[in-house]
Image: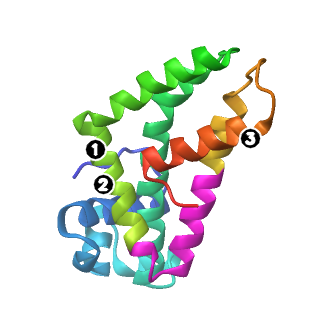
Amino acid sequence: MTMPADLSTRDRLIQAAISIIETEGEAGVRVDQVAALAGFTKPVLYAHFADKDVVIVHAPSLRYRRSLESASQGVIAAISNVKLKDEFDARLEEAIASFADPESRHQRGVRSEVMGSSVSRPDLRDAVVLANRVYISGLAAEVDIEDRESSEWVNITMFSVRQLLGLSA
């Protein structure tokens, strides 16, 4: 695996862990393998992370955030600058239809995998919840419907978006 030269040591280690997780799963992550793949030794890894579990929280957390960023691009592009509810509904429906493409399915799989792993890892669960809040806040910031009578409609719509994207609370 080739690492971009501009990555920090910590980011190289996390990216190496992500690569291993994506090919072998979390059970396949070994400290010496992560360090070697990143081009470092184990002491360098331990200078940045207390233990393997810390690496296994940071790597999936980054995978999750990247997956959300990927999902958000199409949705935000679709709902930006929409002023009328009917137009919002139509654009959101188009964006949701794109979720069936292979890359979107893969990204939902990543989110599902990380959420499953977070059940037994409170630190990872907290990172997932934070990422979801940031993501939903970003979507909500793009919604500026002039004809809505209450925030209830937007809340229901945003809840629906979360469900369609496979997001937790």
Residue 39 visible to the viewer: no
Q: CA distance from mark 2 to mark 3?
A: 30 Å
Q: Position of residue 22 (x, y in %)?
A: 25, 60
Q: CA distance from mark 3 to mark 1?
A: 29 Å
Name the residue that disc number 3 marks. 152
For disc 2, the neighbor class at 10 Å (few under 14, some 14 to 19, many from 20) is: some
Look at the image and say whether residue 122 sits in the magenta stretch. yes
The magenta span reads: 117-133
Look at the image and say whether residue 97 sits in the magenta stretch. no
Q: From what the image shows, is residue 41 above or below residue 7?
A: below
Q: What's the amino acid at mark 2?
A: Gly
Q: Secondary structure at mark 2?
A: helix
Q: Is the residue under label 1 in contact with that under label 2 (CB below 8 Å)?
A: yes
* Extreme-front residue of the structure: 149
Name the residue that disc number 2 marks. 109
Name the residue that disc number 1 marks. 105
